[in-house]
Image (spheres, rainbow, N blue to C red):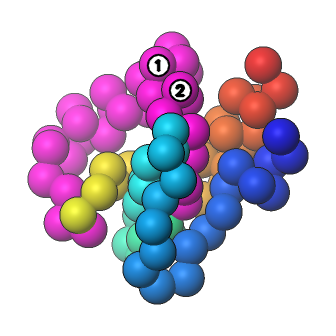
């Protein structure tokens, strides 16, 4: 599957396909990405989640998983996971 399909940025409210989850990424303005749930089990993704939890806690005001990092860092991580 191509990276472009894995990093579908949603415009507005839409349904999330089975096996995927919404993730909100950004430091100030959040962007919504739809990623495969399987990525949540990857060690590098769990490290990013751990760092986010350590710094910001479990407060997710967007209604989905919120990751406080630069878009470029997140896109790079997803790109590497896509290559596995």
Looking at the image, which residue is at 51% across and 14% down? 43
Q: Position of residue 76 (x, y in %)?
A: 72, 42
CA–CA distance between discs 2 and 1? 6 Å
Query: According to the image, label 1 marks what residue?
Result: 41
Is residue 83 toward the left or the right of residue 25 in the image?
right
Residue 51, given in percent of the width and then of the height, sits at 34, 32
Disc 1, SS:
helix
Q: Quadrant of the C terminus?
A: top right
Foreground of the two, 33 or 59:
33
- Using residue 66 as the reference point, say whether residue 34 is left or right of it: right
Density class for disc 2 (Cα within 10 Å; few <14, some 14-19, many ≥20) is few
The residue lying at 29 percent from left, 57 percent from top is 64
Asked if residue 46 is among those painted magenta in the image, a careful observer would answer yes
Q: Nearer the viewer, mark 2 or mark 1?
A: 2
Q: Is residue 6 left or right of residue 57?
A: right
Q: Who's the residue at 23% across and 64% down the image?
A: 63
Could you say which is closer to the camera, residue 59 or residue 51? 59
Mark identifier at residue 66: none
Q: Are marks 2 and 1 in contact (CB under 8 Å)?
A: yes
Could you say where residue 77 lies in the image, as x and y percent from the top left?
A: 66, 36
Residue 6, x across and y down, in percent: 70, 49
Q: Which residue is mark 2?
A: 38
**Residue drawn at point x = 53 percent, y = 26 percent:** 38
User: Does 14 sit above or below residue 66?
Assistant: below
- Range shown magenta: 33-62
State the residue in front, 14 or 31. Answer: 14
Relative to 29, residue 76 above or below? above
Quadrant occupied by the N terminus? top right
Left or right of 76? Residue 40 is left
């Amino acid at each position: 599957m191509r990276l472009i399909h894995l990093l579908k940025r949603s415009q507005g409210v839409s349904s999330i396909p089975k096996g995927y989850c919404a993730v909100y990424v950004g430091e100030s303005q959040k962007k919504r990405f739809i990623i495969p749930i399987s990525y949540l089990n990857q060690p590098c993704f769990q490290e990013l989640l751990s760092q986010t939890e350590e710094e910001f806690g479990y407060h997710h005001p967007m209604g989905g998983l919120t990751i406080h990092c630069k878009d470029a860092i997140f896109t790079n991580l997803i790109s590497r996971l896509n290559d596995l």
